[in-house]
Image (spheres, rainbow, N blue to C red):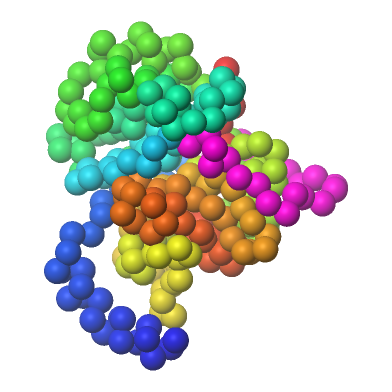
Amino acid sequence: MKRWWWLFGLFLPGILQAQPVPKTGLVFDDPGYEALPFSGSLGKGPLPAKISMEAWCPVVQTQGPYSTCVGFACGYYLHTILEARSRRLTTRSQITPIAFSPGYVYEKAKSSKDYDCSQGISLVKALEVMKEYGSTPIREYPYPSCGKSTGKADQSARTFRIAGYDRVFLAKDTPSDKTRYLKQALADGQPVVVGLAVPASFYFTRSTWQPAPGDNPADPKLTGHALCVIGYDDEKGAFRIINSFGKNWADSGYCWITYTDMGRFVRYGFVIRKS
């Protein structure tokens, strides 16, 4: 295995140049994260061995050539999962039409100079948009709609404003504590938006992400990426996530991230409070 990873690292630059690398788009904001309320809690009893919210997920989509992963993780996935569950919808044909627009959240949160949706946004900015302006169904603001006015969608978005949001763990928490807080939030019925520092190995995930031996979460060159955590499985020792790289990535757009690797690479974790 070590020899395989050594060869992979040797040829990786050529591989990345030969094919387009998916866009990400999370802007790191450590001070903003640390200033937020902390909702993390640990119950006294044992947690379920397995949690899955996959039944309430909309169809996996791709963010394409735009840095909109935060809009997908927060709006299209997290908020839609909670809405579908509250309406007791459990089929993709029912859920996808009511899914929230990733483009709306991004458009509201982005810099006024971000004309081509390439600069990315922070999770805090996206969640503030969802609190102040709301989320609009994707049928009201289709994706992609980079640079298009949100005016006509603003009224419908107000109906779906969230009450607030909280961080799930502290930045100073150990990897094992971050894992415990994430599992507790999921066991409490909350899908979690996470922000990770992702190395190149993440783009080549099959079923379970396997970081390369030299991957270091402290590497300042790593890209920020937002994902939605929708479950965990103790037998696998991993979290289940849904991504915005399309159905051809990993396991039809989903993948597993082991507890150890999530604890190492995750920087932020949020849950939202619906109105």
Q: How many marks?
A: 0
Residue at image position (25%, 76%) is: 12
Q: In which quarter of the image is the C terminus?
A: top right
Task: Answer above or below: position of 68 versus 7.
Answer: above
| Quadrant position of residue 15 | bottom left
The percent position of residue 246, horizontal first and vertical second, equals 31, 48
Report whether 176 appears left or right of 249: right
Residue at image position (45%, 63%) is: 207
Residue at image position (59%, 67%) is: 260
Report whether 189 appears left or right of 123: right
> From where the camera sits, is residue 229 visible?
yes
The percent position of residue 272, horizontal first and vertical second, equals 56, 31
| Quadrant position of residue 206 | bottom left
The percent position of residue 85, horizontal first and vertical second, equals 58, 27
Does the stretch in magenta take in 43? yes
Front residue of 35/196: it is: 196
The percent position of residue 265, horizontal first and vertical second, equals 49, 62
Segment tinted magenta in the rendering: 35-57
- Pick out the residue farthest to the bottom: 3
Q: In which quarter of the image is the N terminus?
A: bottom left
